[in-house]
Image (cartoon, rainbow, N blue to C red):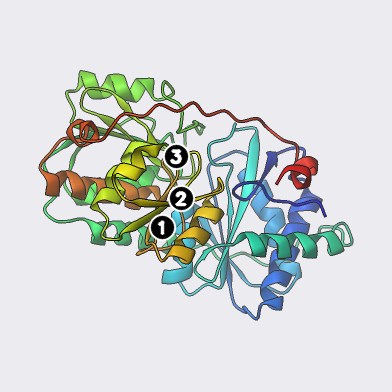
């Protein structure tokens, strides 16, 4: 059976894969999946700031409502805020329309239920349901307005503020959310903390900047700004806000392997979970359990080994004490706490770790060939 899912969600060209029919069908599919798992209730939907996201979400909503589900629209929010809605708003499931770091002409969809991102086993369930119902019903708009709510993003902001060890260290910070999902969240959090910060690429109305957080060089403007302003720290997010990477005061980009290792070192647990493409630096900090690449595999590994922290080399960290989803906002706040507790600069924490070098490569694969590889 052809799988719908890649390493994290469904992704593909927005104008080719995410047709009105496909979006309608996956909306129906998710509703039926929840029904079959005895999960009644309201579904939340959020979007990133890609131009294709409103149209995709609208047709998914038609499918959800056609299957009898009530829907609440959370607007443009970061992925972790959509997941947190399951914990803070009492919704049964959530759908997030986001292409994450991929090119702006592409897009994607992620699903959440039972307080977390769906598992690989649940992905298989959803794929099977979809294969049995696709293209059987013509997409049909359902009359009536969809409730809009800012509660999802507001609750997430309150969560981040609650995690800060007050008072915040007097660091000078440059933030670069790429005009994406974390833009208003992080600016609001830092203002509430009376932090000394400068923001670049931080206007939600401006075009989304899609960047691969594993690549040094894509954050050159941030690195230059940190040096020019003699800032202590630079922080950047991917477009949907579940990844967070850092720049030290010297303007050096810190790979996710190293920021993840620092967070793991200061985490109380004995075991950390990460995929096979994370460098061996983690072995010098904690016992590491390895998984396949992709956040669902990391989450499954955290459950298997009883770990409350996992991370990927792309800056995607999963803080199990908060929720089982990658969370760039929590990663940022916890790093601020570590800098305060350690009384050190980020480059000093990095210098305490051994240097490893790793070269990663990947290639795009058409959806129809996923089942031959995964």
Mark 2 or 1, closer to the camera: 2
Mark 3 or mark 2: name the one nearer the start of the chain.
Answer: 2
> Residue visible at 80% across and 42% down?
368
Q: Nearer the viewer, residue 236 or 304?
A: 304
Residue that label 3 marks: 278
Q: Label 3: how many residues lie within 10 Å, few (<14), some (14-19) or many (20+)? A: many
Q: In the rendered image, which residue does mark 2 sit on?
A: 78
Identity of the residue drawn at 33% across and 53% down: 330
Q: Position of residue 274 (x, y in %)?
A: 45, 48
Query: Mark 3 to mark 2: distance in Å?
Result: 24 Å
Residue 153: image tag: 1
Q: Residue 339: which quarter of the image?
A: top left
Tell me which numbered mark, 3 or 1, is placed earlier along the sequence: 1
Cβ atoms under marks 2 and 1 closer than 8 Å: yes
Q: How many marks?
A: 3
Up/down of 188 relative to 34, above or below: above
Question: In the depicted view, which residue is nearer to us: 111 or 24?
Answer: 111
Q: Secondary structure at mark 3?
A: loop
Pick whichever of labels 2 and 1 is earlier in the sequence.
2
Measure the alpha-carbon separation of dots 2 and 1: 8 Å
Q: Position of residue 168 (x, y in %)?
A: 14, 49
Tell me if residue 140 can be seen: no
- Which marked residue is nearer to the observer: mark 3 or mark 2? 3
State which mark lies toward you, 3 or 1: 3
Q: Residue at x 63, y 59 (%)?
A: 120
Q: Element type at marker 1? A: helix
Q: Residue 11: x, y in percent? A: 66, 43
């Amino acid at each position: 059976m052809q799988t719908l899912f890649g390493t994290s969600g469904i992704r593909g060209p927005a104008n080719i894969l995410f047709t009105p029919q496909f979006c309608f069908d996956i909306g129906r599919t998710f509703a039926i999946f929840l029904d079959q798992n005895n999960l009644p209730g309201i579904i939340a939907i959020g979007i990133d700031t890609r131009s294709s996201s409103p149209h995709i979400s609208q047709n998914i909503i038609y499918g959800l409502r056609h299957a009898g589900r009530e829907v609440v629209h959370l607007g443009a929010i970061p992925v972790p805020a959509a997941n947190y809605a399951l914990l803070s708003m009492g919704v049964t499931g959530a759908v997030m329309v986001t292409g994450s770091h991929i090119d702006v002409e592409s897009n994607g969809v992620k699903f959440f239920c039972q307080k977390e991102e769906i598992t690989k086993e649940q992905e298989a369930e959803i794929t099977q349901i979809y294969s049995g119902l696709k293209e059987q019903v013509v997409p049909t708009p359902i009359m009536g307005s969809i409730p809009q709510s800012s509660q999802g993003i507001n609750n997430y902001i309150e969560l981040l503020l609650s995690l800060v060890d007050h008072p915040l260290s007097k660091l000078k910070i440059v933030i670069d959310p790429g005009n994406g999902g974390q833009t208003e969240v992080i600016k609001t959090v830092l203002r509430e903390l009376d932090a000394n910060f400068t923001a670049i690429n931080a206007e939600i109305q401006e075009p989304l900047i899609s960047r691969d957080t594993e690549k040094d060089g894509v954050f050159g403007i941030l690195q230059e700004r940190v040096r020019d302003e003699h800032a202590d720290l630079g922080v950047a997010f991917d477009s949907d806000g579940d990844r967070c990477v850092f720049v030290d005061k010297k303007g050096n980009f810190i790979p996710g392997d190293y920021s993840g290792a620092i967070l793991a070192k200061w985490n109380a647990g004995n075991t950390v979970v990460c995929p096979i493409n994370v460098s061996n630096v983690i072995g010098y900090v904690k016992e590491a359990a390895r998984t396949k690449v992709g956040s669902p595999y990391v989450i499954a590994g955290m459950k298997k080994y009883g770990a409350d922290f996992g991370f990927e080399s792309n800056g995607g960290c999963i803080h199990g004490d908060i929720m089982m989803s990658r969370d760039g906002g929590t990663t940022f706040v916890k790093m601020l706490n570590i800098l305060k507790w350690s009384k050190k600069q980020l480059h000093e924490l990095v210098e305490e770790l051994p240097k490893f070098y790793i070269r990663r490569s990947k290639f795009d694969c058409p959806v129809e060939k996923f089942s031959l590889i995964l």
